[in-house]
Image (tube, grey):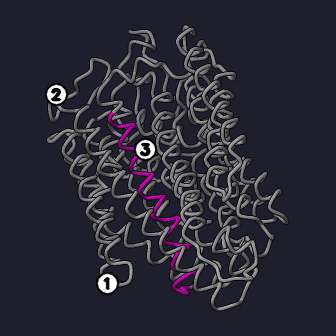
Amino acid sequence: MHCRPSPQKPLTERTERTSCQPSAGRRWAVLGIVSVALFLISIDGSVLFTALPVLSKDLGATAGQQLWILNAYTVVMSGLLLGAGTLGDKLGHRRMFLFGMAVFGVASLACALAYSPGTLIAARVLLAVGAAPMMPATLALIRLTFTDARQRNTAIAVWSMVSVVGAVVGPVVGGLLLEHFHWGSVFLINVPLIVAAIALGAAVIPRDEPDRSRPWDAVSSLLATVALAAGVLAVEEAARVPPSWAKVAAGLAIAAVLGAAFVRRQRRLDDPLLPLDVFAIPRFTAGVVAAVVTLVAVSGLGLVVAQRFQLVAGYSPFQAGLLLVVLAVGALPSSLVGGMLLNRIGERAPIVWGFAVGALGASIALLGVDSPGWFVAGLVVTGIGLGAPASVASSAIVTSVPASRAGMASSVEEVSYEFGNVLATAFFGGGILFVYGLAVDLPAGAPAGAATSLNEALRVSSDPRVVSAAMDAYDTAFTVVLAAVALVCLVGASVVSRLLRETAPGGADEPGGER
């Protein structure tokens, strides 16, 4: 099925980019296929939370290498997403989706066969190169396939639910596989699913008509990628004990200079990679803020909970991952309800109240760290709170602009979530090392490496005094991160409330957007 553009209006003025639509069954089949792809991408962002201690031991990865094994995927993908989405507008989102899946499958195999920290980091970079064109294409294809506003909001809610659930169950999948197989299995499992998705996608996904006249700016994409990587490097170095402040300053300077160059370039281009005027749309900006905050909270919790309960409480990887399923249990219903009620109540209420409930849940988890029942209850409440903002944020971003810019909007949505993931890994991953370094009180004669991280302390010493001191310091850092998650949720609620204070529920407040 090849839908051709309607001749009545130019592409940039149309509400929808195609004049024919697939059948109802085919529309939901498209949703199923892109959801599978999104699920794999989301899992790969968090599956290493439980696998990291095991693979770090097998590969001999240092604390810095561990952070980049986690960060390489999200940093590179975040930098490439804007360019990938705009390229999808130019070349076609179906084509970008199938191409990205093929690269993702090859990269998954490369990750599974990695034999050193360096090769694994390089393979994770290639994994990001495959994921970058896939992610905006998944949402753009939904945007272009579902023309009915209510069906589209429901489809986007399902899409958002899959994204959050994938990020949450990634540690469970990793833990389950590690119970029985080598750590490379957490990547190898992607390959047969990717092959099946490519075959089905080629048969079911309708061809979209690209706008080949639209330019594509590779320089802007490169500026965004390098600026983001430099900023993460600076945060990582600042978390070291002691840090090299010269490296921190250099990283921040590079990030600031290239970030400013990116902004200036967007303002100068006739057809920018990211039109900055979209941030003047309150719904769009509120959606971006909500997406970032949601993933900061979800990924931050996933990172520290999975590792704390393995290293301190003695859980197996699977048990630690299973603990995070309760986040998904809470998020599933609220994500779907938020999407289905969006036309009636608008974005402000589900996002603001969702973040408030998320902050309450993180606080309960913080107070119940030593009580499994209360801790699990806190995670459930946190999931209930964060589910609605996740689905509503995606819809707010994508429907605030005309369908002809579906790729750009989808890219911004994806960048927002991935940037939240990067921030969580960089600040909470680095922050827990920083607080650990300040809090640890090692006995005389302890190996120097024990002061850098709990992982390193367990590796270099079996002295019960050293192990106990290291675990106490890690628990201190863990409680600080939980408190930070609650604070981030409250700040997000405040910012979104101000942005949407004059937005009418149930209707679009921008001429380019639609419900």
Label 1 sits on a secondary structure element that is helix
Where residue 297 sits, quadrant-wise, is bottom left
Percent of width and height locating residue 495: 29, 38
Residue 195 in sight: no
Which amino acid is tagged 3? Answer: Val
Where residue 21 sits, quadrant-wise, is top left
Determine the CA span between mark 1 and mark 2: 41 Å
Residue under label 3, please give it.
292
Residue under label 2, please give it.
502
Front-most of 322 and 422? Answer: 422
Determine the CA span between mark 2 and mark 3: 22 Å
Q: Name the residue located 79 percent from the left edge and 75 percent from the top edge.
A: 58
Identify the disc placed on residue 107. none
Percent of width and height locating residue 309: 51, 79
Provide the major secondary structure of the magenta segment. Answer: helix
Total marks placed: 3
Front-most of 471 and 412? Answer: 471
Residue range (magenta): 286-315
Counting residues from the start of the chain, the first of labels 1 and 2 encountered is 1
Magenta-span inclusion, residue 66: no
Determine the CA span between mark 1 and mark 3: 29 Å
Q: Name the residue located 52 percent from the left edge and 48 percent from the top edge.
A: 423
Which residue is at the far right? 115
Which amino acid is tagged 1? Answer: Gly
> Is 463 situated left or right of 206 in this image?
right
Percent of width and height locating residue 504: 14, 30
* Quarter of the image where the C terminus is located: top left
Label 1–label 3 contact, CB within 8 A? no
Which amino acid is tagged 2? Answer: Glu
